[in-house]
Amino acid sequence: MTRDEILQTIVEILSESFELDPGEISPESKLYEELGLDSIDAVDIFVQLREVTGRRPDPQVARAIRTVAELVGFVESELAAKAAGLPEPDAELPE
Amino acid sequence: MSGEGFGWVLDGMPHRPPMRLIDEVLEAGGGRLVARARIGEGHVLLGERGVSPLAAVELFAQAAAALMVFRAGPGAPPAPGYLLGTRKLEMHAERFAAGDELLIRVTEVWGTGPLAQYDGELLRDGELVARGSINVAAG
C-alpha cells in the first residue's frame, strides 16, 4: 500500500465508524481533540487496522498515537514489520 | 483446557445469580472461552414474549468476564468490569424461550490498558443465533 492508500483507508475507517465527514479529516487532524474520539474509539480503530496490517498492534505504541498522520506512519511500519517477518507484540488484555 | 473444574471461574466472577446468566464454563484457554447458559422458567430476563436476543450482548460480556477470571487464575480477587457497548451485532433469532440451551463462545481480539474488544458467538442447538463484538473495561 502507498502512503496515500493508507491515508484513504484510515479516512474510510474513521468516517464510517464514527460518522465523521471525510472532508474534515486530514493528516494533521488530532484524533482526540479535533475529531472528538476517545480511548474506546481507539480500540475500534486499532482492531480495524489489525485487519489492514495483519498484525496485532503494540498497545504501548497505539496509546502514544495522537494524529491521523501518526496512524498512517503506524500502518506503514506495521506493514514493513510484517514483510520482514517480525514477531507480533504480546497481547495486553485485562484480567 | 476443557472439561470439569471451571467452578472457580464462575465463583471468581463479580456476577451473582440471578444476574449471572452463565451456568457453566465448558472450555477456556488460548484467548477463548466457551460457556453454557440455560433459559430456565424463572430466568431474570424471561418475559411474556420470551427473552430478547439482545441478551446476547450481556452473555458475551459475562463470558468475557469469565475469560478475564480464567486469565487472572484461581484465587485472584473478583475485579469489577464494565460492558461499554457494541458496534457490531447480528441477531438471527426473534427470541429465546424457556428451556433453550445456549452456547456462548468469546474470543479476545485486542486490548490496551483496561480496555479490550471481544468477538462473540451465540448458538442454540448448534445453530448460530447471534454474533458480534463487544468493548469492555476492567478495573
Image (spheres, grey):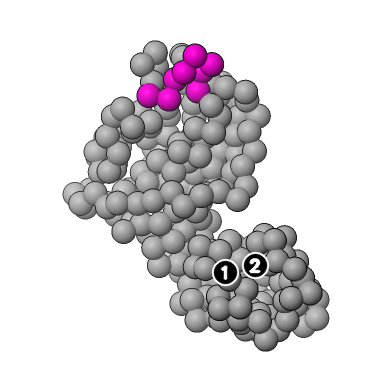
* Residue B68 image offset from top left, x and y in percent: 36, 51
Q: Quadrant of the N terminus of chain A?
A: bottom right
- Would you say B86 lies left or right of B116 here? right
| Residue pictured at 46% horizontal, 58% vertical | B116
| Residue pictured at 60% horizontal, 39% vertical | B131
Q: How far apart are marks 1 and 2 (CA)?
A: 16 Å
Q: What stretch is highlighted in magenta?
A: B44-51
Magenta highlight: main SS: loop
Q: Mark 1 lies on which chain?
A: A
Instruction: Between residue A23 and residue A51, name the one nearer to us.
Output: A23
* Pointers 1 and 2 within a single chain: yes
Instruction: Between residue B79 and residue B84, name the one nearer to us.
Output: B84
Q: Mark 2 lies on which chain?
A: A
| Residue pictured at 42% horizontal, 29% vertical | B36
Q: How crowded is mark 1: few (under 14 residues within 10 Å), some or many (20 or more)?
A: some
Residue A37: which disc?
A: 1
Q: Does the magenta stretch include residue B6?
A: no
Above or below, comparing residue A95 to residue A9 in the picture: above
- Would you say B65 lies left or right of A14 here? left
Amino acid beneath label 2 = Leu
